[in-house]
Image (tube, rainbow, N blue to C red):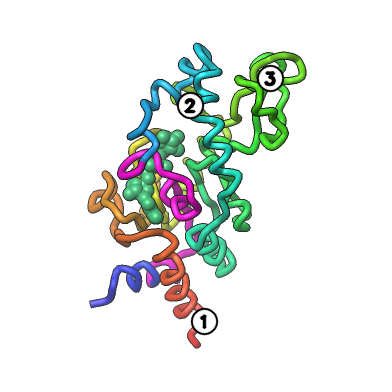
Amino acid sequence: MSTPIEQAADILSKAKSVVALTGAGISVESGIPPFRGKGGLWEKMDPMEVAHIDAFMENPKRVWDLLIKDMKTVLDKARPNAGHTGLVELEELGRMKTVITQNVDGLHQVAGSSDVIEFHGNFAWQRCLDCGQSMPTGQVDLAQSPPQCSCGGILRPDCIFFGEMIPTEALVRSQQVSADCDVMLVVGTSAMVQPSASMPFIAKDNGADVIEINPEPTPLTGRISNLHLMGRAAGLMPKLVAAVRQRLHPS
Ligand code: APR
């Protein structure tokens, strides 16, 4: 009986178009905490009080002080791990086409993925609520709270808060590549937040194999995903890539 990694490698080595859907779990081994589950951010604070647009508009200073400043400290230190680089290697092997990520850390691009859909935006930029001007997060004066734009307007992260719509281009492209792929690799997401969690369903409905990499089962497990590699992304991805490479270029 072949192992789940061998079964996944069989499927990936025959695939023409692979799309990945990633979540906070793929960046855990880069030092970024997840949102849910053990050690999750939302265990320590209520997301509706610190990550909803109404909460931000009501009291931006509070959201900056409680959430955004710490996020900056953690994200500034974060570097891609073997989970991110594994997706790049699958791209170099001609398998991986597009990465749809819910993460705002930009680590897929730093790792070298060439086509990344940032479903929830990117924390590398801040935007002024008044004049709309964008500026790199690295240039924001954090001594001020909330930080302000040169026009005096309040700055907000260029990420999607709860209560906000997903940018149309990101949503439509994600639905398109999910419908067109023949394998979806779902890495490190609890698959609880819509509309990103609907992408594996779209892939499945269009005949794709869905493979999960996650130390925990999710609502997709055994229903939408036909394979679940139970474990951490940085641990499993190198083994999976090696098995795919062995099938494509037997040594
Ligand atoms: N490798 C792979 N998966 C992991 C790892 C790891 N090392 N560590 C944890 N996980 C899994 C957890 O078991 C969980 O299923 O990653 C998942 C993380 O789930 P969430 O914290 O809910 O993150 P995510 O699915 O990305 O959340 C979706 O919710 O809070 C909002 O906007 C935020 O983009 C986020 C969205």
Q: Secondary structure at mark 2?
A: helix
When the figure is inspected, residue 112 is found, relative to residue 140, above or below; the finding is: below
Q: Identify the residue at horizontal 49%, vertical 23% (top origin).
A: 164
Judge whether 224 appears above or below 235 on screen.
Answer: above
The answer to which quarter of the image holds residue 48 is: top left
Per the image, the residue denoted by label 2 is 66
Say which amino acid is labelled 3: Gln
Looking at the figure, which quarter contains the N terminus? bottom left
In which quadrant of this rendering is ligand 1 seen?
Answer: top left
Name the residue: 63% across, 53% down.
Answer: 110
Q: Residue furthest top?
A: 58
Picture coordinates of residue 38, whole percent (x, y) = 31, 44
Where does label 3 land, which residue? Answer: 148
- For label 1, the residue is 249
**Distance CA(mark 3)–CA(mark 1):** 54 Å
Residue 86 x, y percent position in the rendering: 51, 64
CA neighbours of label 3 inside 10 A, class few (<14), some (14 to 19), many (20+): some
Question: Which callout, 2 or 3, points at the residue further toward the start of the chain?
Answer: 2
Find the magenta span and give its range: 10-39
